[in-house]
Amino acid sequence: MQPEGEEEADKALIDKNLNASAHIYNTLNESILKNKEAEVITLPRKEALKLRRAAVICNQSLGGIVKSSRAREDRLIVEQHLMRKTAQRDRIDNMAHRARLLDRMRFQSQSDSGATPVERALRSIANAERALSALSPTASCSAHGAGIIAAQSRLEPQPAASVLSCS
């Protein structure tokens, strides 16, 4: 969208052009209507100079309108390229995220094939803790599933550090 000042300038140029064009038309139309039968129409020098000034104004205002239009088009093309680049980056990020998720799901399905529900729960807790640790590496890391770890250790004695680790 173009700035308000540019829009007002375009409207002023269009009005100027239309006024000059209307002046040229009206002056020539009056001369033609006055001299309907004449092959050659003569205009006084003063009228010819006014028509020439009006034509110059028409040309200048048309030039300004064209420049403004081209500048607006150039700005829109740049915005379009920026939006395409952003969309492409977002698409690449989305594809990378999907690949990470699919890889994680494949790894979990391979490692969970012979695991008990308690082991799967512990692995999920470990993944959540690793994710929290990656998001905030300076925060303290504590096991939220301490009850599950205690139950697991009663069933099968194994070190808790191998099940849950905070990096």
Image: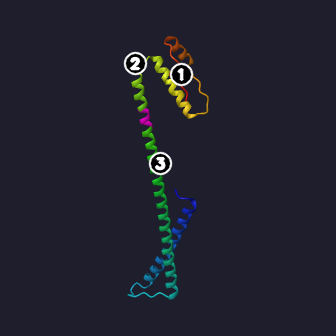
Task: Please name the amino acid that badge 2 sits on.
Answer: Gly
Say which element carries label 1.
helix
Q: Residue at x 48, y 80 (%)?
A: 27
- To which residue does mark 2 refer? 114
- To which residue does mark 3 refer? 86
Give the camera-side residue of 92 and 81. Answer: 92
Q: Is residue 115 above or below residue 42?
A: above
Contact check, label 3 and label 1, Cβ < 8 Å: no
Task: Please name the amino acid that badge 1 sits on.
Answer: Ala
Q: Closer to the N terminus: mark 1 or mark 2?
A: 2
Task: Please name the amino acid that badge 3 sits on.
Answer: Thr
Say which element carries label 3.
helix
Q: Closer to the N terminus: mark 3 or mark 1?
A: 3
Q: What are the residue bounds of the magenta stretch? A: 97-102
Counting other residues with Cα less than 10 Å from the Cα at mark 3, is it few (<14), some (14-19), or many (20 or more)? few
For residue 105, which numbered disc appears in the image?
Answer: none
Q: Please identify the residue farthest to the top as the structure is shown.
A: 154
Task: Please identify, in this view, whether the residue under mark 3 or under mark 2 is nearer the observer.
Answer: 2
Describe residue 109's horizontal placement relative to residue 159 as left or right.
left
Describe residue 108's horizontal placement relative to residue 19 as left or right.
left
Q: Is residue 131 above or below residue 121?
A: below
